[in-house]
Image (cartoon, grey):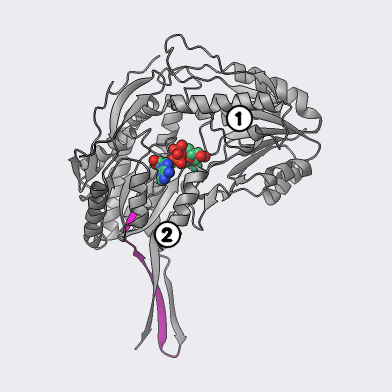
Amino acid sequence: MILPEVQSNYGKLRLYINGEYVDSKTEVWGNVYNPAKDEVIAKVPFSTKDEVKEAIQVAQEVFEKWREVPITTRIQYLFALKNKLEEYSETLARITTQNHGKTVQEARGDMRRTIENVEAAISVAYTLYKGEHLDQVSQEIDETVVREPLGVFGIITPFNFPTMVPFWYIPYAIVLGNTVVVKPSEITPIPMDFITKIFDEIKLPKGVVNVVHGAKDVVDEFLTNKLVQGVTFVGSTRVGKYIYENAGKNGKRAIVQAGAKNFIVVMPDADLNKAIPSIVSSFFGNAGQRCLAAANLITVGNIYDEVKRKFVEASKQLKIGYGLDESVDMGPVVTRDAKKRIIGYIEKGIEEGAKLILDGRDVKVPDYPNGYFLGPTIFDEVTPEMIIAKEEIFGPVATIIQAKSLDEAIDMINRSNYGNASSIFTTIGYYARKFRREVNAGNIGINIGIAAPMAFFPFGGRKDSFFGVLHGQIDSVDFFTDRKVIITRW
Ligand code: NAD
């Protein structure tokens, strides 16, 4: 069944500042597309500098009042937010599919994790109460640590999870008494635009969450404006490095979650009946546009032929189409440019001498002939030195690499510039333990293809996949608070 679109067109998006919808005065507008149809479904303003400044100024003024609101009351807003997100979950999933291209089942998964982050933030008051106080640290001296919110934070998000990624931070920031200015991806801004209506409906005090649109100029204002205490960023390594450097230069806190090139290792003892479906969805779920998506498949020992055959067979079965069709397994990639870039990598792989054993370039979706579709693509005879094995492609392209031993596989993984996630499929505890201890990545999957931590665990990578100290999700509690020590003598 093909589900209806929530709206066919979302018009000119507005800014959300101090609880009001503001028509941007900018002269620069971008097109927002439905990637399955190649149709413009909204116009996104690239906010002017003054508009961003105003949003930050408002957030600063509101911070002074919001921090005085008891945490028990702030938590009540989060309960209301959770209930409304549940109520609008299916609507938001369909909007996400329409704007991003992922299947509606995938978008529903995003919504669950979005809501889970609100739930985890609700628990913050209960987990923080544990009290950092010591009586009599010296003669008649007591010491107490209190956590205080810091002020205004800029939240910068990527195109691929337009609801979930902002919610790795927003609920934690605001429940702790901070205020935020959010800048969604200019490619997928519609879901966040819809969520502003929810903030209105729950009567979240005006100005606690503000939303501005745009790209680099907005980010640069976040990075230089004296009122901004810190930024969170999720996106590519190139932009992430720029943000981390400039946040540091300007004395701001930063969490920077960046690009990835993830590995899956299959050991000869793996249970392939369970492993193959998990591997296929790890490579091709979200059309490969996940920071935790697998990119390189390493087979160890004599299981290579069987894994290759089964992986290709299962990948061929995937139905490609518009994600609002519930029978579809894989939607389009997000933009025409993304499709072009991914095809460029496929051509590069052929040039490098890898063997293309499944070619997704000429996939046809008759009902949506203009969509940015690509089928699952698999390269064999790949070596770790090839560009297609090293660089982030961020599309439905898999490589297969052979290794003689687990040591060799781990060595290949650890030589990668990235360190977001790696998974192993095995039935032997020794291999699993060795893998989790020796692989240098932030997230390890054991018989799980997508090693995505729940909201109440930290989320971050290593090497070029992450810059900073504190991670996303629950870890951001320490990022959004500062600890003040009070030393008392009576
Ligand atoms: P991107 O880096 O192009 O954009 C991310 C954000 O940065 C957007 O809001 C964009 O407007 C802004 N931006 C773009 N260019 C900028 C510039 N020159 N200066 C300042 N800001 C700029 O990333 P994307 O294409 O939207 O997202 C895909 C990337 O995100 C992939 O690399 C993926 O691995 C990564 N990602 C990482 C994680 C993680 O947890 N590590 C999660 C999701 C996505």
Q: Which class describes the residues within 10 Å of circle 2: few (<14), some (14-19), or many (20+)?
A: many
User: Which residue matches tag 2?
Assistant: 253
Does the rendering let one see residue 239? yes
Q: Indicate yes or no whether the magenta region holds residue 150.
A: yes
Residue 112: image quadrant is top left
Tell me if 406 is positioned left or right of 222 in this view: right
Of the numbered discs 1 and 2, the one sitting upstream in the chain is: 2
Q: Residue at x 43, y 26 (%)?
A: 335
Q: Is residue 122 visible?
A: no
Which region of the structure is painted magenta?
A: 139-153
Instruction: Say which of marks 1 and 2 sits in front.
Output: 2
Q: Is residue 61 above or below residue 219?
A: below
Q: Amino acid at mark 1?
A: Ser
User: The N terminus lies in which quarter of the figure?
Assistant: top left
Residue displayed at 61% across by 25% down:
346
Residue 13: horizontal and vertical position, in percent?
A: 25, 33
